[in-house]
Image (cartoon, rainbow, N blue to C red):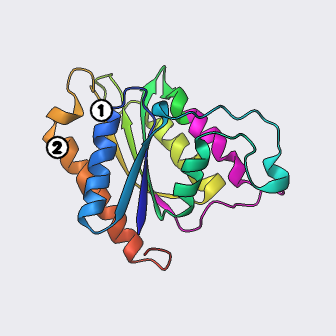
């Protein structure tokens, strides 16, 4: 079983990366093969709206997104991490999501691999733990509606500037458990393995 982690933060060793890493560690503990990619360290251009993928079911932009397409095509699980910047997902995360448009082929058929489940890791600096539920809901709905990805768990870290993930054992434990849960879920369904 392959689980791919996507780190949508421009700060590659901070809260988002820590949480994604912990989710992947939990998945690895259950026997999954894991890999993580930091978008800000890759050359990934924004979607240019050319619509070529509607004829070929492939993106014509030649950049590092093709490394991510290859990883995603082999993965049963997705761990998507983003900080909240200016009340929404980071620019890096949005670029990644926009480039997934290539999976919607000629008649907007769904070419994303079937049966994928996800864990979301969301970090932000505000102290209100109930904030940004609408962003989490937006992410869940987009992944489900366009790509058939079931979001199994959300690890949400508030007050992340004052209390970083690395110093919050409860957040690390929650992330680790979410990774285990992801593998357990995928192992019990026909598409997992």
Assign a secondary structure to mark 1. Answer: helix
Please rate how many residues cluster around mark 2, counting C-alpha atoms within 10 Å: few if below 14, some from 14 to 19, many from 20.
few
Q: Residue at x 38, y 75 (%)?
A: 187
Residue 147 sits in which quadrant? bottom right
**Left-right relation of 132 to 56:** left
Q: Nearer the viewer, residue 78 or 2?
A: 2
Q: Position of residue 163 (x, y in %)?
A: 20, 26
For the N terminus, the quadrant is bottom left
The residue that mark 1 highlights is 15
Q: Residue at x 30, y 51 (%)?
A: 23
Q: Where is residue 50 drawn, in percent x and y?
A: 82, 37
- Image quadrant where residue 152 sits: bottom left
Mark 2 and mark 1 lie on one chain; the one further toward the N terminus is 1
The residue wearing badge 2 is 170
Q: Is residue 120 left or right of residue 176?
A: right
Q: Do tag 2 and tag 1 residues touch (Cβ < 8 Å)?
A: no
Which residues lie in the magenta part? 94-117
Q: Residue at x 14, y 41 (%)?
A: 169
At label 1, counting other C-alpha atoms closer than 10 Å, the crowd grade (few under 14, some 14-19, many 20 or more) is many
């Amino acid at each position: 079983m392959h689980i791919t982690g996507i780190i949508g933060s421009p700060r590659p060793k901070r809260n988002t990366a820590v949480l994604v890493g912990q989710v992947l560690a939990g998945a690895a503990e259950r026997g999954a093969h894991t890999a993580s990619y930091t978008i800000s360290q890759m050359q990934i251009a924004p979607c240019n709206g050319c619509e070529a993928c509607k004829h070929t079911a492939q993106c014509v932009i030649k950049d590092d997104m093709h490394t991510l397409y290859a990883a995603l095509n082999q993965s049963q699980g997705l761990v998507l991490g983003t900080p909240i910047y200016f009340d929404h997902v980071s620019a890096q995360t949005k670029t990644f999501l926009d480039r997934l448009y290539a999976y919607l082929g000629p008649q907007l058929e769904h070419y994303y691999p079937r049966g994928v489940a996800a864990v979301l890791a969301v970090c932000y600096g505000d102290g209100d733990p109930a904030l940004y539920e609408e962003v989490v809901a937006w992410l869940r709905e987009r992944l489900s509606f366009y790509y058939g990805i079931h979001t199994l768990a959300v690890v949400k870290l508030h007050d992340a500037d004052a209390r970083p993930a690395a110093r919050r054992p409860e957040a690390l434990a929650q992330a680790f458990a979410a990774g285990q849960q992801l593998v357990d879920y995928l192992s019990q369904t026909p598409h997992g393995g």
